[in-house]
Image (tube, rainbow, N blue to C red):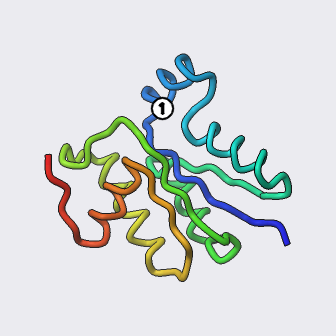
Amino acid sequence: MSLNILIVEGNIPEDSEVFIRAAGASASENLKNLLLKLEPNTSVKIINPGKDEETKEALKNISHYHGIIFTGGAMRINDMTDEIKKHINFASNCFKHDKKILAICWGLQVCSTAAGGKVAP
């Protein structure tokens, strides 16, 4: 059985560009490449929660995913911008489904906040 994984990009496009210049790929692409190296038959979809159409599509198809990974990113949860609110809302919607979730750094801030927790500045 091959895995079907959803990766949630933790950076806004401008921050992803900085990461790409430094590391050669975005955080989500690096993670995708690692997953495929470890398990070549894995199907990986990457979305950006700031893009409403991508989140709508991902939630519509969430039953197809075995797990969800929220990547790290450069944002700070306590800034509470509209973009950050979209990330939190997407995580909240993911919690409504019986999915395994891995949250890395920024992703953990998002998921903790979505679950009702507080992240200290």
Q: At which x and y percent is residue 110?
A: 34, 57
Does dot 1 land on a helix, a strand or a loop? Answer: helix
* Farthest-out residue, top: 21
Q: Is residue 75 left or right of residue 38?
A: left
Q: At which x and y percent is residue 87?
A: 39, 55
Between residues 1 and 47, which one lies in front from this camera angle?
1
Tell me what residue is drawn at x 50 percent, y 25 percent: 19
* Farthest-out residue, left: 121
Q: At which x and y percent is residue 2?
A: 82, 66
> Can you say whether 14 is above or below 45 in the image?
above
Tell me what residue is drawn at x 47 percent, y 52 percent: 49
- Mark 1: which amino acid? Pro
> Can you say whether 45 is above or below 18 in the image?
below
> Can you say whether 58 is above or below 24 in the image?
below
Quadrant that contains the N terminus? bottom right
Which of the 4 image quadrants contains residue 89? bottom left
Q: At which x and y percent is residue 7?
A: 59, 53
Label 1 environment density (alpha carbons within 10 Å; few <14, some 14–19, many ≥20): few
Q: Is residue 107 left or right of residue 75?
A: right
Which of the 4 image quadrants contains residue 34? top right
Q: Is residue 26 left or right of residue 76?
A: right
Tell me what residue is drawn at x 32 percent, y 39 percent: 75
Tell me what residue is drawn at x 65 percent, y 77 percent: 63
* Farthest-out residue, front: 38
Between residues 35 and 51, which one lies in front from this camera angle?
35
Q: How many marks?
A: 1
Residue denoted by label 1:
13
Q: Is residue 12 left or right of residue 30?
A: left
